[in-house]
């Protein structure tokens, strides 16, 4: 049952939802949720919410390393420059940290021979050496997102969301004797179990906003498709009732939020209506593109990042991962005038033209990331923004695709972690600092007890 809403001096629970047949639309953070701070403080003493906006964590993976010459700023500190690849971040430069010098030692062969791409994904959030196998005996380690979910995942409807754009394959050999599970996943529930990502944004949308029995959800879906109705139509009366009790500012926030939901729904309808025609973007798919997955790769990324924004905004989850592409991806980027395969280009051998094309691919990915950050920054949460209350890591498990090296990884950190991170800087950490030291710092800021994680040697102290 949805919490009842007082008609006077309205004070909303963070768990208030708008309901309809098979529908449950969680609300964003509204000012009306904060008069209950005193009660929330008492609840916090008993292990409940503090009434402050929660801190969220997200991790975004890109494959094949980067063109480091056009990635790494020349200056450190607050007045760092933005090289060509990072230029799309100029509007949010004060919200980010460029971290140089972090290392994933367990992404190196360490006696296991070739298979750097598979290792780069499996080590990205685990900091553990994967067992080299293409059989069922896969083993690597729990990932930082799932470690956090064990502690704070119970606070939300979904402990975590795992999203991506390339299909997963958890069996077979994908890289020099390594299981495809290593190349297809960055999130691991435990050392033996990948948290398989969802690549269909239509299914993610339904998961976030459908509710009730299987029959109710199926009925609601059938009605929407038959009469071309929005999911919002089923909760319209609940929304009208709530708006009458809100102040002008909260009414505006609610309208903006519901408009965002409808806009995503409209884009999903457009993707579903597209007849299947093979295209360059189908390279990762060995079968016709499923209904609901956009033909355009950029729109696929936009929908997935927008879905995570909604999930964070409505506190449906506080932990998310997105793989823009699987490790070793050889996707073509013809839409930015790079028809070559990404993995093929990454073996550039110092060729200037290949390096130029790699920079264009890297810049495209960063532009998609920058758009995600701008969306988060545009959403107000009390005196802060949604981005202020996030800790987001963007990067690759390989530095240079030609060398397949795992030191000096390309990493961008975004968000202020609820006010605990000093952003707007380029920070060079001590050479060979484990990336897991960053994860320890993030976990502690999220209230997750941790002494060590992966191959950490301590906490990265450069965030605060």
Image (cartoon, rainbow, N blue to C red):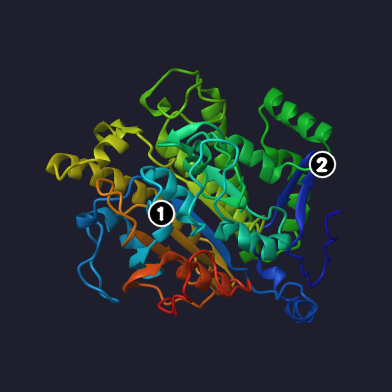
Query: In the rendered image, which residue does mark 2 sit on?
Result: 212
The residue closer to the viewer here, 258 or 88, is: 88
| Badge 2 density bin: few <14, some 14–19, many ≥20, Cα 10 Å | some
458 relative to 242 in the view: left or right:
left
Pick whichever of labels 2 and 1 is earlier in the sequence: 1
Element assignment for label 1: helix
Mark 2 vs 1: CB contact within 8 A:
no
Which residue is pictured at 39% across the width and 28% down the height?
Answer: 281
Query: In the rendered image, which residue does mark 1 sit on?
Result: 107
Q: Residue furthest left?
A: 352
**Percent of width and height locating residue 258:** 63, 49
Between tags 2 and 1, which lies in front? Answer: 1
Which residue is pictured at 56% across the width and 33% down the height?
Answer: 171
Up-down: is 7 above or below 371?
Answer: below
**Percent of width and height locating residue 143:** 56, 56
Splitting the image into 4 quarters, where does residue 103 fall? bottom left
The residue closer to the viewer here, 82 or 64, is: 64
| Badge 1 density bin: few <14, some 14–19, many ≥20, Cα 10 Å | many
**Percent of width and height locating residue 5:** 82, 62
* Residue 377 visible, this orientation: no
The residue closer to the viewer here, 339 or 16, is: 339
Element assignment for label 2: loop
Q: What separation in Å lies between label 2 and label 1 (alpha carbons)?
A: 43 Å
Quarter of the figure with the C terminus: bottom left
**Percent of width and height locating residue 413:** 42, 64
Which residue is pictured at 27% across the width and 36% down the height?
Answer: 336
């Amino acid at each position: 049952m949805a919490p009842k809403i007082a008609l006077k001096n309205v004070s909303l629970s963070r768990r208030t939802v708008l309901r309809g047949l098979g529908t449950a639309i969680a609300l964003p953070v509204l000012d009306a949720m904060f008069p209950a701070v005193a009660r929330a403080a008492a609840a916090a003493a008993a292990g409940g919410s503090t009434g402050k906006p929660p801190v969220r964590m997200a991790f975004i993976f890109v494959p094949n390393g980067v063109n480091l010459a056009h990635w790494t700023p020349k200056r450190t500190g607050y007045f760092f420059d933005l090289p060509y690849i990072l230029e799309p971040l100029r509007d949010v430069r004060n919200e980010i940290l460029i971290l140089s010098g972090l290392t994933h030692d367990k992404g190196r062969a360490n006696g296991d021979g070739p298979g750097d791409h598979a290792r780069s994904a499996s080590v990205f959030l685990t900091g553990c050496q994967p067992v080299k196998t293409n059989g069922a005996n896969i083993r690597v380690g729990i990932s930082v997102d799932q470690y956090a979910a064990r502690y704070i995942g119970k606070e939300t409807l979904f402990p975590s969301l795992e999203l991506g754009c390339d299909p997963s394959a958890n069996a077979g050999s994908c890289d020099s004797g390594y299981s495809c599970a290593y190349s297809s996943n960055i999130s691991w529930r435990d050392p033996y179990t990948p948290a398989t990502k969802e690549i269909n944004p239509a299914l993610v949308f339904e998961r976030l906003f459908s509710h009730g029995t299987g029959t109710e959800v199926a009925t609601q879906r059938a009605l929407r498709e038959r009469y071309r109705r929005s999911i919002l139509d089923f909760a319209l009366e609940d929304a009208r009732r709530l708006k009458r009790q809100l102040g002008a500012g909260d009414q505006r926030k609610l309208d903006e939020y519901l408009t965002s939901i409808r806009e995503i729904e409209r884009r999903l309808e457009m993707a579903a209506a597209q007849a299947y025609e093979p295209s360059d973007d189908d390279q990762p798919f060995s079968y016709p593109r499923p209904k609901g997955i956009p033909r355009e790769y950029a729109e696929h990324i936009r929908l997935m990042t927008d879905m995570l924004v909604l999930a964070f905004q409505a506190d449906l989850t506080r932990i998310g991962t997105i793989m823009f592409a699987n490790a070793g991806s050889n996707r073509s980027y013809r839409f930015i005038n790079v028809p070559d395969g990404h993995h093929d280009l990454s073996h550039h051998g110092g060729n200037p033209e290949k390096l130029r094309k790699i920079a264009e691919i890297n810049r495209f990915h960063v532009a998609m990331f920058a758009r995600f950050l701008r969306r988060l920054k545009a959403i107000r949460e009390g005196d802060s923004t949604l981005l202020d209350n996030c800790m987001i890591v963007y990067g690759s498990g390989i530095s240079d695709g030609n060398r397949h090296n795992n030191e000096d990884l390309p990493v961008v950190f975004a968000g202020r972690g609820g006010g605990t991170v000093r952003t707007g800087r380029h920070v060079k950490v001590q050479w060979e600092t484990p990336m897991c030291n960053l994860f320890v710092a993030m976990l502690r800021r999220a209230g997750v007890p941790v002494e060590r994680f992966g191959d950490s040697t301590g906490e990265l102290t450069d965030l605060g």
